[in-house]
Image (cartoon, rainbow, N blue to C red):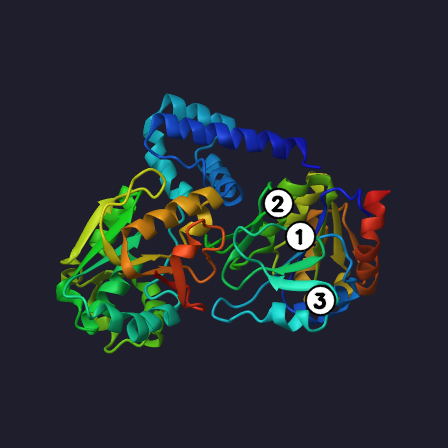
C-alpha cells in the first residue's frame, strides 16, 4: 500500500445522488488510501450539507473541498454549492466561479477534466444517476488520458439520462449496479499497487 | 501518471502565459492553472487555433489579440448583492464600526463589471454613509471597468438582483435605483459620484490607497497560493488598523502568510478585521 502511486476517484451524480452515494461511500474503509472527489448537482442557493450528512455515515473522512488545500488520501471531498471544483496538477484543489456548464455549477465535466489532467491513467471516474448529460465529456477525457470509467447501469438508476449519455460517449466504460461499483472501488488500491 | 497530452498542454499553457506577459502588462503566470487552462482552451476554439501553441504564436505576432483574450483570462461572473448574507452582515455589524470615522475609503478590488460596487454604493447610501465615503473600484480589465462605470445590466438579471437586495436587508425597492429601457437596466448615475474607477493589478501594482474596508470577492480563488499571499499582503498594507476585509464565501486566508495580521470578525461570511 505504501508504494501506491498518486491515484484518485472522481464521482458525479445528480437526481437520486444521495441514495446512490449512500451505497458507495459508506462502503469505503477509514484506511482507504485514495482521495475521492464528488460533484453532486445542487441548487446554488442551498447551503450544501452533503459533507455533514455523509460524514455521519461513513468511516472514511468526509469534508467540503476548500480552495488551495492539499489533497490527502482517505478523504472524500464534496464540491461546495455554486462553485466548480478543480484538481490542480500539483495535487491541490481550486474552486471557481466561472459560468455553469450544462446549467450546473458545480459541474461534473469540470472536475473530471481537471482530474484527468492531474492523474492520467491512475484516475477512476464514476458517473451515477442523473437527468442531464453532464459527466459524459468528462468521462471521455478520463479515458482518453488512460484512466478508467465506471457507470451506474441505467436500469438501476433513478435518473437514466446521465449514465446513458456517459455510456454513449464512452463505449469503453462499463455499466455496473451500485453494489458492484462499491466493490470495485474498494479493491481499486490493490489493483493499482500490483 | 499524467498523460503525454496533458503534460504537453501544461507546457503550452505556460509558454502562452509567458508570451502574454512579454507582449503586454498582464501577468497570469501565478493564476490557478486548471481553471485558466479550461478558459484558454475555449479561447483557442473561439480564435480557431488548433492548439494553445498556435494561440501563443498569434499572441506573439499580433499582440492586439491580447485585449480580446482578457474575457477568457479573467472571470466576470457576478451579481448585485451576491451572497445576500454577506451584505446583510456588512450592514448590521460592520457599518456601525465604520460610522465612527469622519471619512471613509472603500476598496472594491477586482470589481469586474461593477455589480459589487453598486451593491456597496446602495448599502452606504441607505445607511447614510455615502457622502463621507470614497469608493475605489479597481480591475485589470479596462473593458470591464467601462462596463462598471456605465452601470448597465441585462434586464433579465434584475429579478435575481432584486431578490438578493431584499435578502440583504434592502430598505427600499431595487427598482428605485435603476431605470429600465430597451431590455436593459441602467443604474442611477449618482450612485457612482463618490467612486474612482481605476486600472489596478493585484499581481504587479502596489498599494494605492488607505482603506477602511476592502471587499475582494471570488478573485483570490483564481490565484495560486503565492499570488493569494501577495494580494492579501496588499490588502493588509492598505487597511487602517481595525479596518475590515471581506472575501468570497469559499475563500480563506489560511494559505496566506498574512493570516496572523487579521482576526475573524465573522467567520461564516469571511469578514476579517485587521489587528
Dots 3, 2 in contact, CB < 8 A? no
Mark 3 or 2 closer to N-term?
A: 3
Chain letter of the residue beneath label 1 in the structure image: A
- For numbered disc 1, what is the local secondary structure? loop
Residue A117 visible in rendering? yes
Q: Which residue is mark 1?
A: A72
**Residue found 51% across the figure and 38% down from its top:** B41
Q: Residue A147: percent from the left, percent from the top?
A: 73, 43
Distance in Å between CA atoms under marks 3 and 2: 24 Å
Q: Residue A183: percent from the left, percent from the top?
A: 84, 59
Which circle marks residue A91 in the picture?
Answer: 2
Which circle marks residue B222 in the picture?
Answer: none
Q: Are marks 3 and 2 on the same chain?
A: yes
Q: Nearer the viewer, residue A78 or A5?
A: A5
Chain letter of the residue beneath label 3 in the structure image: A
Chain letter of the residue beneath label 2 in the structure image: A
Looking at the image, residue B178 lies above or below residue A35: below
Dots 2, 1 in contact, CB < 8 A? no
Distance in Å between CA atoms under marks 3 and 1: 20 Å
Mark 3 or 1 closer to N-term?
A: 3
**Image quarter of residue B22:** top left
**Image quarter of residue B172:** bottom left
Q: Nearer the viewer, residue A162 or A20?
A: A20
- For numbered disc 2, what is the local secondary structure? loop
Q: Which residue is mark 3?
A: A21
Q: Are marks 3 and 1 on the same chain?
A: yes
Looking at the image, residue B150 lies above or below residue B101: above
Q: Is residue B91 left or right of residue A18?
A: left
Amino acid at each position: 500500500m505504501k508504494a501506491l502511486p498518486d491515484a484518485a476517484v472522481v464521482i458525479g451524480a445528480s437526481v437520486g445522488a444521495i441514495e446512490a452515494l449512500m451505497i458507495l461511500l459508506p462502503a469505503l474503509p477509514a484506511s482507504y488510501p485514495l482521495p475521492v472527489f464528488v460533484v453532486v448537482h445542487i441548487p446554488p442557493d442551498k447551503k450544501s450539507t452533503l459533507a455533514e450528512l455523509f460524514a455521519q455515515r461513513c468511516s472514511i473522512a468526509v469534508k467540503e473541498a476548500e480552495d488551495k488545500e492539499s489533497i490527502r488520501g482517505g478523504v472524500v471531498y464534496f464540491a461546495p454549492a455554486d462553485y466548480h471544483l478543480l484538481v490542480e496538477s500539483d495535487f491541490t484543489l481550486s474552486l471557481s466561479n466561472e459560468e455553469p456548464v450544462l446549467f450546473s455549477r458545480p459541474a461534473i465535466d469540470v472536475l473530471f477534466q481537471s482530474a484527468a489532467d492531474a492523474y492520467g491513467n491512475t484516475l477512476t471516474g464514476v458517473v451515477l444517476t442523473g437527468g442531464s448529460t453532464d459527466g459524459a465529456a468528462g468521462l471521455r477525457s478520463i479515458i482518453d488520458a488512460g484512466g478508467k470509467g465506471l457507470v451506474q447501469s441505467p436500469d438501476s438508476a433513478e435518473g437514466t439520462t446521465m449514465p446513458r449519455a456517459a455510456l454513449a460517449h464512452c463505449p469503453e466504460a462499463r455499466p455496473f449496479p451500485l453494489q458492484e461499483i462499491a466493490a470495485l472501488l474498494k479493491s481499486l488500491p490493490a489493483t493499482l499497487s500490483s | 501518471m499524467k498523460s503525454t497530452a496533458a503534460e504537453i498542454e501544461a507546457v503550452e499553457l505556460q509558454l502562452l502565459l509567458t508570451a502574454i506577459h512579454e507582449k503586454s502588462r498582464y501577468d497570469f503566470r501565478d493564476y490557478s492553472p486548471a481553471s485558466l487552462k479550461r478558459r484558454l482552451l475555449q479561447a483557442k476554439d473561439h480564435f480557431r487555433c488548433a492548439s494553445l501553441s498556435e494561440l501563443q504564436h498569434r499572441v506573439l505576432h499580433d499582440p492586439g489579440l491580447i485585449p480580446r483574450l482578457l474575457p477568457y483570462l479573467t472571470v466576470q461572473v457576478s451579481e448585485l448583492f451576491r451572497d445576500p448574507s454577506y451584505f446583510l452582515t456588512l450592514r448590521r455589524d460592520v457599518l456601525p464600526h465604520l460610522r465612527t470615522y469622519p471619512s471613509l475609503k472603500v476598496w472594491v478590488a477586482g470589481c469586474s463589471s461593477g455589480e459589487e460596487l453598486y451593491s456597496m454604493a446602495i448599502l452606504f447610501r441607505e445607511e447614510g454613509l455615502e457622502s463621507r465615503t470614497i469608493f475605489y473600484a479597481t480591475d485589470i480589465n479596462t473593458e470591464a471597468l467601462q462596463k462598471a462605470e456605465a452601470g448597465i445590466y441585462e434586464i433579465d438579471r434584475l429579478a435575481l438582483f432584486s431578490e438578493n437586495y431584499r435578502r440583504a436587508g434592502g430598505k427600499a425597492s431595487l427598482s428605485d435605483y435603476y431605470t429600465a429601457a430597451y431590455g436593459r437596466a441602467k443604474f442611477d448615475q449618482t450612485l457612482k459620484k463618490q467612486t474612482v474607477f481605476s486600472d489596478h493589478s493585484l499581481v504587479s501594482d502596489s498599494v494605492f490607497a488607505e482603506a477602511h474596508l476592502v471587499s475582494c470577492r471570488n478573485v483570490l480563488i483564481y490565484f495560486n497560493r503565492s499570488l493569494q499571499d501577495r494580494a492579501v499582503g496588499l490588502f493588509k498594507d492598505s487597511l487602517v488598523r481595525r479596518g475590515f476585509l471581506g472575501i468570497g464565501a469559499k475563500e480563506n486566508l489560511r494559505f496566506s502568510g498574512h493570516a496572523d495580521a487579521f482576526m475573524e470578525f465573522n467567520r461564516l461570511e469571511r469578514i476579517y478585521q485587521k489587528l
